[in-house]
Image: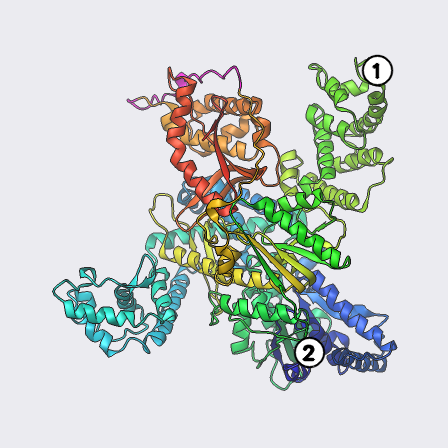
């Protein structure tokens, strides 16, 4: 090993280190060895604290340490690295015996915990009035949105409070009185309040000036870096050429500008001279637009020649192009006022959230982390922290350090604040910035680079780099080196999160052909791709039945077609958090039972539980029970013998359903719903023992029901919404289907990465852009108000920054996926219809490496998939008559009467869309009238307009197309935002069926007076053709699937295919 010196140095327990350990480099073994060595010299095991980020990582580290201590009883191993671990464990046990620790019997003294657990420990022991309150429960992730939304609703109610009315109403007006956007803003910001809450509020108010200072500092730093790059390239000759320009703002630039804010204008002028703004490429045309008319022929030629000489100066070109992406130098007064109002509302929402936490006796991880920081802030001496934790920390080891957030870094800094050089205390960070892929959890790869450069607190940190790969064969390591050296950037950048690639050296000598294989496909070849994966899996298992094969994807939605293909070929597989709990058959039975007990008249729910395995009625018997129009299913079950044409088998099977549910219904009011539900379920399942998967689903479902009941939101809509964030457990198998994030830290013999040509989900347009920086500063900017034409410079800067960060994280995500393999990697992906890889896909990164392979795919002559068309839709023979206009639609306060269409058509559309989005087809009149009031509809119109909305929803529910449009599918998305480089679209409803992407757009248009149905359909096609074509173009590029589109018009019960 050519990095043995670094590995040995890392075991020097007198120094502090930050170790970059690429994939397969033995990171866990190294941190285990250092821990064991520290144990061999420690006064107490609790003096050593090991922190990581997941419970899985904690379990693995503890197992490694305990196993090493247990192995001492065995013969010493022969492998050098294992022998080193063995010897360190021997020394640790000697110290254990000497000091009476008995670590083998008391492994709980080994302090290996998650950072969240440490925060919880600090908070639980912090001496404050909170100790009078019982310990709080950490809420599950699926509960976050519900509680944040509750806090948002309570915040909006403060509009009636004189003290807060101005701020709340101003923010509501800023959002164009869209209550849903108001709620969304608060929910988004509460979810990441640990980023902004500790930094912004000075003496209880937001210091807006500090935001302006941060923005100006970023600009000045950028200009300083630009000046450093440009001064080597733009010399006296260049500025001499500018003197000939007829534009005064150009000719007056006689030297390289500085880095002062006043110099920004000159830098932008230089960028205009050298760069084409639209494409970001070097300017080719020297003309009058930059002050060089035709008569300056010689000067134009000289400037053109100079610009041509810059062709290889990529860094200068990039930096000049990005000048137009910088934030605002000064914030307008309106922006300052708006931010101040938003900040006040956010502060109120935090207070409301704390009230909810207090009432429920719960908290989220953000709350725990913020309280832990606050607790450490009150500790003036190191002894205070020791008292808080019951022990003195002398050594800290942090695994997976590249996944640290600024809040977590702050916690670590406070733990080591006051540590001095040569005081016997050390810190040891280990991780790999090339594997930093948790930006969505606020991890910042720049933190790793920052600590390498500057250390932490008062400690000098020695950087070490490992480069030996023990996991993969020589062929995989070498080819990965070739691929990622081309993909990764050359330089590191803390702000945008760019990391250069660090090559690995293989420990293995095994070489094989086709260690990494690439399979290109044309567009619309999803089925062929799935069949190819099946072939690869079969071949891998044929070579060795014990081989572990992992199929890794960016998004769970990319696995749908593959799961079906594997089932078709009878291949057992393990889906790790890929199948929604809601789509599981047993969950559907539990949901039907819940609906039945909540609503005794819900015919569909009662028929479903009779069809479920615990009863198993045949369809012809269900048809008999469903035909009664004057009796509920429950009443029929009560009198089974009197139900005509019901089979004897059905009577016998149904009787125990009635007995079980009857008992639960009679106990209503005496026992909780969860208790009654559990009783019925136990009765129904007593003759059928649940398997492990079903037991796990039952536990999750009961926990969810209990949450809903205790929060008084026990209804089908809430339950189904929460089920979307839970995943069904899967039976163990050698074939693993999982996301790349779930595979991090694991290894497999064969890795298959399909869907290379697909993009991940676009981030929704943020109502507030926010970014943390390494100097403990945060910059934020709200989205523009609806009446403004464009976003603020600061908002666009932060948006651009996030796009850059996502681009560099995409590189790292691909590296994580391809570095999981021991033996072989299989890459599968489809190009887009234009013959090129889709922007933002893995294939766009690999395209140049596999350019020849992609050329073999003839886009124009692809074999067309045999796509089973969607079932033929039956149109209503009798059409709903045109909606009659009521006199109340006329605005009598205006001399020029206007129909409802002209005044409130947008409001009607918004509300109908809302109910269709949430599949709520029978809302209460109160619910509809509340939404109408919120949108400014006069009281005298509430009744007639709510009736109109109800009629549209009833039409939808009765339509023959209803079941097909609103059928539950895993692929269904509603009100989703998608973007390409030029536009953002919001789609009402889309889903994939039989390999076709269906786009459904809801329209509340109605027949004009005297208009025929045929004319109406033609009018709608013409009116919306361009819009739907735009949707199709964006979505086909995004999903890499053929699409079909339709308009649904509930006013006339028409599904119009385009």
Q: Tell me whether circle 1 and circle 2 mark residues in contact (CB < 8 Å).
A: no
Question: What residue appears at the point 49 percent right and 57 percent down from the top-left corner?
Answer: 844
Residue 287 position in % (x across, y down): 19, 61
Q: Nearer the viewer, residue 290 or 801?
A: 290
Left or right: where 368 falls relative to 231: right
Residue 668 position in % (x across, y down): 77, 30
Which of the numbered marks, if any, corresponds to residue 691? none
User: Tag count in the figure?
Assistant: 2
Disc 2 target residue: 394
Residue 720 position in % (x across, y down): 64, 38
Question: What residue appears at the point 57 percent right and 61 percent down from the top-left corner?
Answer: 814
Q: How is the image coloured?
A: rainbow
Disc 1 target residue: 641
178 up-or-down from 894: above or below: below
Q: Is residue 730 visible?
A: yes
Q: Quadrant of residue 972?
A: top right
Magenta span covers which residues?
876-896
**Cα distance between the residues tagged 1 and 2:** 78 Å
């Amino acid at each position: 090993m050519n990095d043995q010196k670094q590995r040995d140095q890392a075991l020097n327990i007198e120094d502090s280190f930050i170790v970059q350990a690429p994939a397969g480099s033995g990171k866990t073994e190294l941190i285990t060895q250092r821990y064991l060595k520290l144990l061999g010299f420690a006064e107490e095991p609790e003096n050593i604290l090991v922190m990581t980020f997941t419970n899985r990582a904690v379990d693995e580290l503890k197992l490694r340490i305990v196993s090493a201590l247990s192995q001492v009883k065995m013969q010493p191993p022969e492998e050098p690295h294992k022998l080193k671990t063995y010897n360190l464990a021997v020394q640790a046990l000697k110290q254990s015996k000497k000091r009476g620790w008995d670590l083998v019997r008391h492994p709980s003294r080994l302090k290996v915990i998650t950072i969240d657990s440490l925060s919880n420990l600090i908070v639980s022991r912090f001496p404050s009035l909170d100790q009078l309150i019982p310990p709080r429960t950490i809420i599950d992730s699926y509960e976050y949105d519900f509680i944040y939304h509750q806090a948002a609703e309570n915040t909006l109610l403060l509009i009636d409070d004189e003290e807060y009315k101005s701020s709340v109403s101003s923010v509501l007006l800023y959002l164009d009185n869209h209550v849903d956007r108001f709620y969304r803003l608060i929910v988004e910001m509460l979810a990441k309040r640990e980023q902004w809450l500790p930094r912004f509020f000075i003496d209880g108010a937001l210091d807006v000036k500090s935001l302006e200072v941060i923005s100006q500092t970023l600009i000045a730093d950028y200009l300083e870096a630009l000046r450093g790059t440009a001064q080597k390239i733009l010399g006296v000759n260049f500025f001499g050429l500018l003197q000939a320009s007829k534009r005064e703002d150009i000719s007056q630039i006689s030297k390289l500008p500085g880095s002062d804010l006043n110099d920004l204008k000159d830098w932008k002028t230089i960028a205009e001279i050298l760069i084409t703004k639209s494409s970001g490429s070097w300017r080719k045309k020297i003309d009058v637009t930059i002050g060089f008319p035709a008569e300056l022929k010689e000067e134009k030629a000289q400037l053109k020649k100079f610009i041509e000489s810059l062709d290889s100066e990529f860094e200068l070109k990039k930096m000049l192009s990005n000048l137009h992406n910088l934030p605002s130098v000064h914030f307008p007064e309106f922006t300052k006022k708006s931010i101040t109002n938003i900040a006040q509302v956010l502060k109120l929402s935090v207070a409301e959230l704390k009230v909810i936490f207090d009432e429920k006796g719960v908290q989220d991880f953000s709350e725990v982390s913020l309280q832990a920081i606050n607790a450490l802030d009150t500790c003036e001496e190191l002894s205070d922290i020791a008292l808080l934790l019951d022990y003195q920390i002398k050594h800290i080891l942090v695994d997976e350090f590249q996944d640290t957030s600024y809040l977590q870094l702050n916690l670590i800094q406070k733990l080591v604040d006051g540590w001095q050089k040569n005081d016997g205390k050390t810190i040891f960070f280990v991780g790999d910035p090339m594997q930093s892929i948790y930006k969505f959890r606020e991890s910042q790869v720049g933190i790793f680079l920052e600590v390498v450069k500057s250390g932490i607190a008062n400690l000098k940190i020695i950087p070490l780099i490992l480069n030996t790969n023990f996991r993969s064969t020589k062929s995989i390591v070498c080819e990965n080196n070739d691929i990622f050296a081309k993909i990764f950037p050359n330089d590191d950048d803390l702000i945008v999160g760019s990391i250069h690639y660090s090559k690995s050296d293989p420990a293995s000598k095994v070489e094989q052909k086709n260690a990494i294989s690439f399979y290109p496909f044309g567009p619309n070849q999803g089925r062929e791709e799935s069949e190819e994966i099946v072939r690869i899996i079969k071949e891998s298992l044929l070579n060795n039945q014990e081989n572990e094969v992992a199929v890794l994807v960016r998004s769970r939605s990319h696995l749908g077609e593959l799961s079906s293909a594997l089932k078709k070929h009878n291949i057992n597989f393990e889906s790790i958090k890929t199948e929604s709990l809601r789509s599981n058959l047993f969950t559907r039975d539990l949901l039907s039972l819940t609906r039945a007990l909540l609503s005794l008249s819900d015919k569909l729910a009662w028929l479903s539980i009779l069809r479920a395995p615990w009863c198993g009625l045949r369809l012809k018997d269900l048809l008999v029970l469903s035909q009664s129009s004057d009796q509920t299913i429950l009443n029929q079950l009560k009198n089974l013998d009197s139900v005509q044409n019901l089979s004897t088998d059905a009577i016998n099977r149904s009787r125990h359903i009635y007995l079980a549910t009857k008992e639960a219904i009679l106990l209503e009011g005496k026992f909780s719903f969860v208790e009654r539900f559990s009783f019925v379920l136990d009765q129904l399942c007593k003759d059928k023992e649940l398997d492990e998967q079903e037991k796990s689903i039952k536990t999750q479902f009961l926990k969810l029901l209990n949450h809903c009941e205790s929060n008084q939101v026990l209804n089908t809509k809430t339950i189904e919404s929460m089920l979307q964030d839970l995943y069904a457990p899967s039976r163990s198998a050698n074939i693993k289907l999982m996301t790349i994030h779930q595979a991090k830290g694991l290894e497999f013999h064969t890795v298959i990465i399909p869907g290379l040509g697909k993009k991940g989900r676009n981030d929704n347009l943020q109502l507030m852009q926010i970014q943390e920086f390494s100097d403990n500063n945060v910059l934020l900017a709200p989205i523009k108000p609806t009446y403004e034409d464009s976003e603020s410079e600061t908002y666009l800067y932060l948006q651009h920054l996030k796009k850059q960060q996502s681009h560099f994280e995409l590189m790292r995500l691909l590296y994580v996926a391809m570095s999981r393999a021991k033996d072989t990697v299989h890459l599968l992906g489809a190009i887009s219809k234009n013959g090129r890889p889709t922007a933002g896909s893995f294939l766009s990164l690999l395209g140049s490496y596999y350019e020849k392979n992609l050329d073999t795919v003839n886009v124009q002559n692809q074999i067309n998939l045999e796509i089973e068309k969607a079932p033929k839709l039956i149109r209503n023979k009798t059409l709903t008559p045109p909606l009659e206009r009521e006199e109340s639609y006329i605005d009598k306060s205006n001399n020029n009467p206007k129909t409802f269409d002209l005044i409130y058509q947008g409001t009607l559309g918004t509300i109908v869309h809302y109910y269709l989005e949430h599949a709520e087809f029978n809302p209460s009149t109160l619910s509809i009238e509340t939404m109408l009031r919120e949108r400014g509809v006069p009281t005298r119109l509430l009744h007639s307009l709510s009736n109109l909305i109800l009629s549209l929803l009833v039409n939808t529910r009765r339509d023959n197309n209803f079941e097909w449009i609103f059928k539950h599918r895993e692929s269904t998305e509603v009100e989703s935002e998608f973007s390409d480089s030029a536009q953002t679209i919001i789609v009402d409803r889309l889903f994939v069926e039989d390999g076709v992407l269906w786009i459904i757009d809801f329209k509340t248009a109605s027949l004009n007076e005297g208009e025929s149905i045929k004319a109406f359909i033609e009018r709608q096609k013409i009116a919306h053709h361009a819009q739907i074509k735009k949707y199709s173009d964006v979505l086909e590029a995004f999903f890499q699937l053929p699409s079909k589109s339709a308009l649904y018009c509930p006013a006339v019960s028409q599904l119009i295919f385009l």
